[in-house]
Image: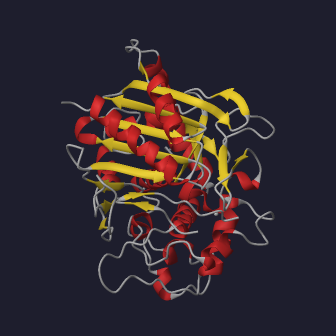
């Protein structure tokens, strides 16, 4: 039930676990997005369906989709396979896929919007923001900052039996996700953070992102889900974007995730609580959207916030993108995977042996799906790959696709 880490590219499979814009600026952002939609048409994107079908078949995945952006355009996209094993409905580039921990960068960007509004600081602590709600916090826990939570340097651990007991508890069906995040902090409040005494302070922590989300909710007065919707999804025009299981309850209208049993036999997990991780840890990884919308998000980051819409300033986005901690060395990395890297806010920062410069990258998985994103700001390029299947098989397929598409579309 631990966290998956491939080199310095990060994800958060949780095992089975069974795992604003300011109000006045918001209409302006929508108007800006509408204006972009009415601008001169761009060239048609290259169709990747045939290539992806070959990779999908090679790895035995139900479905695989990918997209590439360059300088504000989606220059290639495609999808291959079926929405679920045993369901004869082809996927398309409009199908929703789960993002897993790739959601963390959305949480970090929402934090940036609230920092710019003066509602919170990167240096704000859990005690300062939530001490009035959660009494008698361990002093060391109360001193943990938003920056530490977003960079996984707080000393709050990676998922273990204690954290998983918090995610799955008796009040899960009795409180809102916002209330459950406060409840999670209440249950954890006596724990003192434990930063490794030697080496890197990095410890990948979904619970830490849960607490970061609670801080953002407290200073804004809005649920984390509404913050992401209003401040990122809507301004970028990500119409397919949402939270939790990808499919509408009772319908096979999206790429369905698959759970593997102990023998590796897959079962399609379409709806209900078993189809995703608990909503309490939403800020750590319950976003979903089509690969085209995922690409629009990747492109905005590749453009370093300079293209619009203005979600945060380029200066604030640079803070989000910059390395904040060097991660521990990774022993015996797979071929082509670096043995070390850095972590920003919601992004890994690594130099791969096949990229020209350090890139922003992240993996995401709820143990039923897999997503991978690579952003190279220096080339204004991004690559996104999503699959409705978990584990090493999906990661290997996604890595092959990202490497291939980067080689094909990166500037020579």
Q: Nearer the viewer, residue 163 or 150?
A: 163
In the image, what residue occupies the spot 48% across and 77% down? 156
Q: Nearer the viewer, residue 51 or 234?
A: 51
Q: List x then y, in percent, for residue 170.
A: 79, 72
Q: List x then y, in percent, for residue 192.
A: 50, 86
Q: Is residue 350 above or below residue 268?
A: below
Q: Is residue 6 above or below residue 85?
A: below
In the image, what residue occupies the spot 28% across and 55% down? 350
Is residue 134 among the parts visible in the rendering? no
The total number of labels drawn is: 0
In the image, what residue occupies the spot 35% across and 37% down? 382
Q: How is the image coloured?
A: secondary structure
Is residue 253 among the parts visible in the rendering? yes
Q: List x then y, in percent, for residue 172.
A: 76, 66
Q: List x then y, in percent, for residue 69.
A: 37, 30
Q: Quadrant of the N terminus?
A: bottom right
Q: Is residue 331 above or below residue 379?
A: below
Is residue 288 rendered to the left or right of residue 4? Answer: right
Q: Nearer the viewer, residue 173 or 331?
A: 331
Is residue 43 rendered to the left or right of residue 83? Answer: left
Q: Is residue 291 above or below residue 214?
A: above
Is residue 399 rendered to the left or right of residue 242? Answer: left
Q: Nearer the viewer, residue 104 or 267?
A: 267
Residue 60 placement: quadrant: top right
Q: Quadrant of the C terminus?
A: top left
């Amino acid at each position: 039930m631990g966290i998956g880490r491939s080199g310095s590219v990060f994800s958060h499979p949780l095992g089975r676990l069974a795992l604003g814009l300011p109000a006045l600026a918001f209409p302006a952002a929508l108007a800006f997005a509408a204006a972009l939609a009415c601008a001169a048409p761009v060239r048609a994107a290259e169709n990747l369906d045939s290539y992806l079908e070959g990779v999908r078949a090679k790895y035995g995945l139900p479905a695989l989709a990918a997209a590439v952006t360059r300088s504000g355009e989606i220059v290639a996209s495609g999808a291959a396979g079926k929405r679920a094993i045993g369901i004869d409905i082809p996927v398309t580039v409009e199908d929703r896929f789960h993002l897993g921990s790739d959601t963390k960068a959305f949480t970090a960007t929402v934090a940036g919007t609230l920092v710019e509004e003066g509602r919170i600081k990167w240096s704000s602590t859990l005690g300062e923001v939530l001490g009035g709600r959660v009494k008698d916090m361990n002093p060391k826990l109360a001193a943990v900052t938003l920056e530490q939570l977003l960079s996984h340097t707080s000393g709050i651990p990676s998922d273990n039996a204690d954290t998983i007991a918090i995610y799955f508890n008796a009040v899960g069906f009795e409180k809102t996700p916002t209330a459950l995040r406060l409840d999670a902090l209440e249950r954890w409040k006596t724990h003192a953070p434990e930063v490794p005494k030697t080496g890197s302070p990095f410890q990948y922590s979904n619970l830490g992102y849960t607490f970061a989300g609670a801080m953002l909710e407290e200073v804004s007065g809005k649920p984390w889900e509404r913050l992401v919707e209003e401040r990122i999804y809507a301004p970028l025009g990500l119409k397919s974007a949402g939270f939790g299981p990808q499919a509408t309850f009772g319908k096979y209208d999206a790429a369905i995730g698959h759970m593997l049993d102990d023998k590796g036999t897959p079962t399609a997990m379409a709806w209900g609580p078993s189809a995703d991780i608990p909503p309490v840890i939403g800020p750590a990884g319950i976003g979903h959207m089509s690969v085209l919308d995922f690409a629009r998000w990747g492109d905005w980051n590749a453009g370093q916030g300079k293209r619009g819409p203005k979600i945060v300033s380029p200066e604030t986005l640079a803070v989000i993108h910059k390395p904040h901690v060097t991660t521990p060395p990774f022993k015996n990395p797979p071929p082509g995977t670096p043995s070390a890297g850095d972590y920003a806010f919601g992004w890994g920062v690594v130099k791969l042996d096949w990229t020209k410069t350090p890139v922003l990258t992240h993996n995401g998985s709820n143990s039923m799906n897999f997503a991978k994103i690579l952003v190279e700001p220096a080339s204004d390029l991004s690559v996104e790959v999503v699959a409705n299947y978990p584990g090493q098989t999906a990661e290997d397929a996604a890595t092959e696709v990202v490497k291939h598409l980067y080689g094909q579309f990166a500037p020579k």
